[in-house]
Image (cartoon, grey):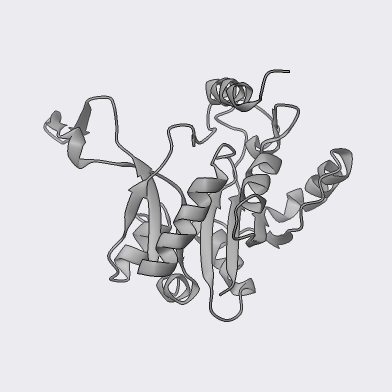
Amino acid sequence: MKYYAIIVAGGSGNRMQSIIAKQFLLLDGKPILMHTIAAFDQSTYKPEILLVLNIHQHSYWETLCLKYSFDIPHKIISGGEQRFHSVKNGLKVIKGKGIVAVHDAVRPLVSAALITRSYQVAEETGNCITGIKPTDSVRKITVQGNEALNRAELALIQTPQTFHVSLLKKAYQAPFRNEFTDDASVVEYAGSKINLIEGERENIKITYPEDLEIAAVFIKKRTPAM
């Protein structure tokens, strides 16, 4: 069986209040994206890494790889208009059967153990997504106002989201819809039941400036004291 990882790096720096795309911002001395790729390289499955990146950022990324002596093998693929189209571009590169994990480039703290577990479950069941239980109270916004929801029945979905290649390719034959917010929603729309496993609290998505500060704290906690 072959294993793949599609790392989607199409984000901008708007909500980070930065002119630099957030996947290129520094975390513990190197770009966020390098931490993310390294996590997949550390998985026992050693997947083939497919980096989907805006075509205008390819040369900049190559410059960063030289600057930071980043030599983990990966293939660069041009991104699309939406995340949906970027994933679809990544899938086009994959030939034959296998297991593919799709992951947000700006989730650099995902553990190799969670990645490995995702591949295992997806290989056994067809698909696997990760998520955590909310700790805050949750309310649904309605036309009339808002109403309380039972947080025990909810999950905050993360990546990686992992699938048999054939299953994900078939699902991505559908035209884009606004409700396709992640890969699980695409596969579910195609008629498949989604398998959910426990994610990690540290597997945060870096979206706002304070997220980068939180990630730095988590990184420091992982680093053994000298």
Q: Is residue 41 above or below residue 29?
A: below
Q: Nearer the viewer, residue 56 or 75?
A: 75
Q: Is residue 122 above or below residue 129?
A: below
The residue lying at 57 percent from left, 23 percent from top is: 209
Looking at the figure, which quarter contains the N terminus? bottom right
Q: For residue 137, which quarter of the picture?
A: top left
The residue lying at 32 percent from left, 71 percent from top is: 190
The residue lying at 30 percent from left, 69 percent from top is: 192
Tell which residue pokes out farthest to the bottom in this image.
Answer: 96
Does residue 30 appear left or right of residue 142 in this picture?
right
Note whether residue 177 is visible. Answer: no
Q: Nearer the viewer, residue 120 or 21?
A: 120
Q: Percent x, y for residue 128? A: 39, 58
Q: Percent x, y for residue 95? A: 61, 79
Q: Percent x, y for residue 94? A: 61, 74
Q: How many marks?
A: 0
Does residue 84 appear left or right of residue 9 in this picture?
left
Q: Percent x, y for residue 197? A: 35, 50
Does residue 123 appear left or right of residue 189 in this picture?
right
Note whether residue 106 is visible. Answer: yes
